[in-house]
Amino acid sequence: MGEQLLKFAHFPHIARLLSAETVPAHARLSVLDVGCGPGTLVNYYPVPLPYDVYGLDLWPHQLRQAAAKRLYAGLLQANLVDGIPFRNESFDIIVCGEILLYLPNPRQILAECCRLLRPGGMLLVYNPISRFPKIIGKLKKWSRMVYQEKSTIALDCQRDWKISTRPCRVTYYKPGGLIEDVNATGLRVENITAFRLLLNRIRALNKLEDYRWYRRASELIARRYPHLATDILIEARKDTSTQAGASVHESGIVSKISGVSEPLNLRRPNT
């Protein structure tokens, strides 16, 4: 059942988008999985991988799970509040899957993604959306003042992530707001896709996803009317003539910044 849930529908869609990308002159696409977590996304890629995938996350336990899949060309622990520690134009494709909602600086991260993309490169942003982001954001912040799980951290006001295991949601977007922020980086939005209409936190609704007709109807409506969906996937591309801006991370492929460890190089999967 797990693979059928609409919450995972974007993973195979992203894999198809990557497979459709034209192979560059250097023969292999370079992909950055921002907020890779346990490496769920690579489960949907063909094996052996036709591209080099690099993962970035804050928590070591997530990176260890990703490393166990033996599919990443490299993994790096980094705190995205401080930016993304790679030099300009390092990647052909960047995937930000459900990561902006946890960050107090989503616009900065989107700008960083633009900087890291090679000309003609593609950015894929998958993120929850809301009709009333300001109201929900304030209610969430007030609720954290009353109670917050000890294992969580709100990165907009707390910095000691080492005592936590997962982040709280701190940023809420309307569909138009997220699209505007992507456009503001200089990237060109090419397509918007949605997959589900309900978050399905109620078990009865989860059971509905066992039925193919329900999954298909939800996807059809969400794709036709993405502003009604709970999540959207934005496909944006960097213009071939765009030059990357200056950055404090230009000096090398990986720079030392606060909260960043050395990259973990992994063996390539057996072929």
Image (spheres, rainbow, N blue to C red):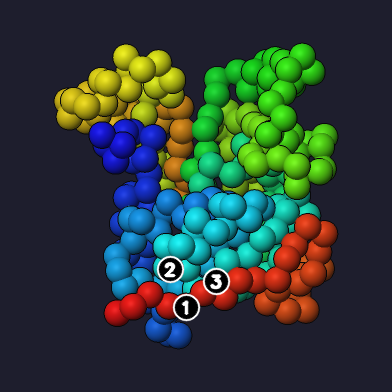
Q: Give coordinates of residue 127: x percent, y percent.
A: 52, 38
> Viewer-proximal residue, 31 or 271?
271
> Viewer-proximal residue, 172 or 148?
148
Q: Which residue is mark 1?
A: 267
Q: Is residue 120 left or right of residue 10?
A: right
Q: Which residue is mark 3?
A: 74
Tell me the CA gap for discs 3 and 1: 9 Å
Counting residues from the start of the chain, the first of labels 1 and 2 encountered is 2
Q: Give coordinates of residue 226: x percent, y percent.
A: 41, 31
Tell me the CA gap for discs 2 and 3: 10 Å
Graded by Cα atoms within 10 Å as few (under 14), some (14 to 19) or many (20 or more), the crowding at tag 1 reads: few
Query: Tag on residue 70?
Result: 2
Instruction: Look at label 2 and name its amino acid.
Output: Arg
The image quarter containing residue 25 is bottom left
The reply to whether the C-beta atoms of the residues labelled 1 and 2 are less than 8 Å apart is yes
Q: Is residue 55 left or right of residue 230?
A: right
Front of the two marks 3 and 1: 1
Counting residues from the start of the chain, the first of labels 3 and 1 encountered is 3
What residue is at 60 percent from the left and 18 percent from the top? Answer: 132
